[in-house]
Image: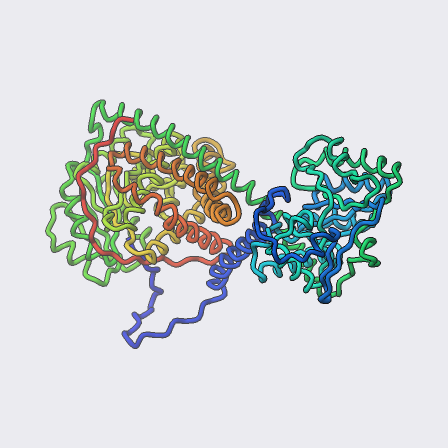
């Protein structure tokens, strides 16, 4: 039922006039719109930084082969492994006799680089570390420790791509990002480079030589190798040491080792064998700068570049922390979703069996007449169907229509139907809670059924709804609300949500004696219980949730009657859906906060406070707020991870949802055909619900009191044949 806030006394209606321009957004509105956008931008930025700086790469061993090498100069092929093409000159350098350059690729690694450095430092042996920008940005302290120990630093690109397959702009970006990481981590740049997947100069092809020339144009000296230890194969420490020993003896060599990319314990052990062996044979150890005759190939950066690098490294650090936290939260959310589905199915099955035992026993133990209260505000399109469905009830009823200041002739139309036992009460607009209280005070019977004016009852609904009142402890009963306009896709999505999300939850809450909400579309109350709970209140925008919690705190039992069916009109547009769910979400938060003291109370109130309120907070607020992580990280996995694994994981989540939905439809006797829309619901509809809840939470945080959200009606609720619930 739609509502507008009560009109202030003496306030005259606004006269018709030209349409006004839309007023600018207030600071609170801007806050509620800006914060989600900022959060989304932050998360996207963090994932982009983390994805690009952490995506894995293949080791140097997985190189290329079989490409032509016709353009590679003979002087390079036959020359030394260090190539300098800067300043339009071609020079190559070899390590002098009895000189070894120990070079390490793919680091820095938090585990193995410090162990490699410790061995080198102990033997006072310099090393040349060709680092990737990814690892440097993630482990800046390790790079600084290498530089403090006097070791040489070279560039191994940022994300370890095969540069021969990349465009010029890609190559430039790889180099720029790596230099940015070096500047931020240690305040240096380097003009020393080793291309990923490169080896000896004899293995150069035309594509890689073209890259080497471009690197020279940008001021880089390129280092290839003389000997590959193949330490990535883990052949054993002694085999690695033997492969690093120059052959023939006495010749100089540039030796390739690795300090990252896997378990490098054999490499560390091999250094303990190799260095003493070579020193005993009269070898000395040098760096690339020593061989090319330069004081150093690294240099400090300027202030501007230094701070750019620090910001970049800080962004990488923040992104790593945030993604770690998000991953933990994702694990928590995934566990909660899975646990919830399992618990729902188990408890729903038990509830269905218990309900079947009750309905197969003596029927209609409650036969006394019931008052039905229908609050209405501008419900001309819906009121005829609603009243005719009530008049066809197989249980004796009196029908009280409370017209709450309608301006479309709702009251006149209700009276013109001339239905028996229908009373129309006209009153100034005062809001839905006040209208309901007016109807309750005019009721002739001690049991009152409440429904919205856009809802249609089956003939058996009222009779089935009041049967739990045979137990004098029961103060209220929730019925089974269904979507009556489900012919369009949006209606089908809401139909799935009602059957799966609302009614399956109610079965669980009913067994746990902590049902948090009696839906406004179909609920019954004991008048005595309403009075003890303080009647309907306008304190929140979810008066149905508010009164349900108040009844719990007053000591009354709340029951659920799954066979008491009602078909209600769901929003037909995303705009109207947003407004409705925004009000629901905000009202639920208001009601939970209002009744928070139940956490410390005793008896039924305490049971609801310590069971119902936590379940409500976890599964209706916290989990939906965190659930977008599933979709965000699914996109992240498709872009930066393994797409197949990501698709399988997301499909697994969808499969769990589908099992729950199918079982819920089975229990309600509904056709499974609408479930074809479930994947689309998870992709589109669910995102809208996330945003609604986020906005509702922000509204609650900034203390804004949300006005009533009016919804448009179409009056197209259809009364389908009553489904027959299946056996569990």
At 78% from the left and 54% from the top, the residue drawn is 93
Q: Nearer the viewer, residue 415 or 271?
A: 271
Spot occupied by residue 37 in the image (x, y as percentages of width and height): 49, 59
The quarter of the displayed image where residue 72 is located? bottom right
Query: In the displayed structure, does residue 650 sit left or right of residue 351?
Result: right
Question: Which coloring applies here?
Answer: rainbow
Query: In the displayed structure, does residue 166 sit left or right of residue 243?
Result: left
User: How many dots with numbers?
Assistant: 0
Query: In the displayed structure, does residue 636 sit left or right of residue 381?
Result: right
From this viewpoint, is residue 553 visible? no
Spot occupied by residue 442 in the image (x, y as percentages of width and height): 24, 47
Spot occupied by residue 159 in the image (x, y as percentages of width and height): 61, 51
Spot occupied by residue 566 in the image (x, y as percentages of width and height): 24, 42
Q: Nearer the viewer, residue 569 or 560?
A: 569
Height in image: 694 above or below 117? Answer: below
Height in image: 589 above or below 352? Answer: below
Q: Nearer the viewer, residue 177 or 635?
A: 177
Residue projecting furthest to the bottom: 18
Q: Nearer the viewer, residue 718 or 438?
A: 718
């Amino acid at each position: 039922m739609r509502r507008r806030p009560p009109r202030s006394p003496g306030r005259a209606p606004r006269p018709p006039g030209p349409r006004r321009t839309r007023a600018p957004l207030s600071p609170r509105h801007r806050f509620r719109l800006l914060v989600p956008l900022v959060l989304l931008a932050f998360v996207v930025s963090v994932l982009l930084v983390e994805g690009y700086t952490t995506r894995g790469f293949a080791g140097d061993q997985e190189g290329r082969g079989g490409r032509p090498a016709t353009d590679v100069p003979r002087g390079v092929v036959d020359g030394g492994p260090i190539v300098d093409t800067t300043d339009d000159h071609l020079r190559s350098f070899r390590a002098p006799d009895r000189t070894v350059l120990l070079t390490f690729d793919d680091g820095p690694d938090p585990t193995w680089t410090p162990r490699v450095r410790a061995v080198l430092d102990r033997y006072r042996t310099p090393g040349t570390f060709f680092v990737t920008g990814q690892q440097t940005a993630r482990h800046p302290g390790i790079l600084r420790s290498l530089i403090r120990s006097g070791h040489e630093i070279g560039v191994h690109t940022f994300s370890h791509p095969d540069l021969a397959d990349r465009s010029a702009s890609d190559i430039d970006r790889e180099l720029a990002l790596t230099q940015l990481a070096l500047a931020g981590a240690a305040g240096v740049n380097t003009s020393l480079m080793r291309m990923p997947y490169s080896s000896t100069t004899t293995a150069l092809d035309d594509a890689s030589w073209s890259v080497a020339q471009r690197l020279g144009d940008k001021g880089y000296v390129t280092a290839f190798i003389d000997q590959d230890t193949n330490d990535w194969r883990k052949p054993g420490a002694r085999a690695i040491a033997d492969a690093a020993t120059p052959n023939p003896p006495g010749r100089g060599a540039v030796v390739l080792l690795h300090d990252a990319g896997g378990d490098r314990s054999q490499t560390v052990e091999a250094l303990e064998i190799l260095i003493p062996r070579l020193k005993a044979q009269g070898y000395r150890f040098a760096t690339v700068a020593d061989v090319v005759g330069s004081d150093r190939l690294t240099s400090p950066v300027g202030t501007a570049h230094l701070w750019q690098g620090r910001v970049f490294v800080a962004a990488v650090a923040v992104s790593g922390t945030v993604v770690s936290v998000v991953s933990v939260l994702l694990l928590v959310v995934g566990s909660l979703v899975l646990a919830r589905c399992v618990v729902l199915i188990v408890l729903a099955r038990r509830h269905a069996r218990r309900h079947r035992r009750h309905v197969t026993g003596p029927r209609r133990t409650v036969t006394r007449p019931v008052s039905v209260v229908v609050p209405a505000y501008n419900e001309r399109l819906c009121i005829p169907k609603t009243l005719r469905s009530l008049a066809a009830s197989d249980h004796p009823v009196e029908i009280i229509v409370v017209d709450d200041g309608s301006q479309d002739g709702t009251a006149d139309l209700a009276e013109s139907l001339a239905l028996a036992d229908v009373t129309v009460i006209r009153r100034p607009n005062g809001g839905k809670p006040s209208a309901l209280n007016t109807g309750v005070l005019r009721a002739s019977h001690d049991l009152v059924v409440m429904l919205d004016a856009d809802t249609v009852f089956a003939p058996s609904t009222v009779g089935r709804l009041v049967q739990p009142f045979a137990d004098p402890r029961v103060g209220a009963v929730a019925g089974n609300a269904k979507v009556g306009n489900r012919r369009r896709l949006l209606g089908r999505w809401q139909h799935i949500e009602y059957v799966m999300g609302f009614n399956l939850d109610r079965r669980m809450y009913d067994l746990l004696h902590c049902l948090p909400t009696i839906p406004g579309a179909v609920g019954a109350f004991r008048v005595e219980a309403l009075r003890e709970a303080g009647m309907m209140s306008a304190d929140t925008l979810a008066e149905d949730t508010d009164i349900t919690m108040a009844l719990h705190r007053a000591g009354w039992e709340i029951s659920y009657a799954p066979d008491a069916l009602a078909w209600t009109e769901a929003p037909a547009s995303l705009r109207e859906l947003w407004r409705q769910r925004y009000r629901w979400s905000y009202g639920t938060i208001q009601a939970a906060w209002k009744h928070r003291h139940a956490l410390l109370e005793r008896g039924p109130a305490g049971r609801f406070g310590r069971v119902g309120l936590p379940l409500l907070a976890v599964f209706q607020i916290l989990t939906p707020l965190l659930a977008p992580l599933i979709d965000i990280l699914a996109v992240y996995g498709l872009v930066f991870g393994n797409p197949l694994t990501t698709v399988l994981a997301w499909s697994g989540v969808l499969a769990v949802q589908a099992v729950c939905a199918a079982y819920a439809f089975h229990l309600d006797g509904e056709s499974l055909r609408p479930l074809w829309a479930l994947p689309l619901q998870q992709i589109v509809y669910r995102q809208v619900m996330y945003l609604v809840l986020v906005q509702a939470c922000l509204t609650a945080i900034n203390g804004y009191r949300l006005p009533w959200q009016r919804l448009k009606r179409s009056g197209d609720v259809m009364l389908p044949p009553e489904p027959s619930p299946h056996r569990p």
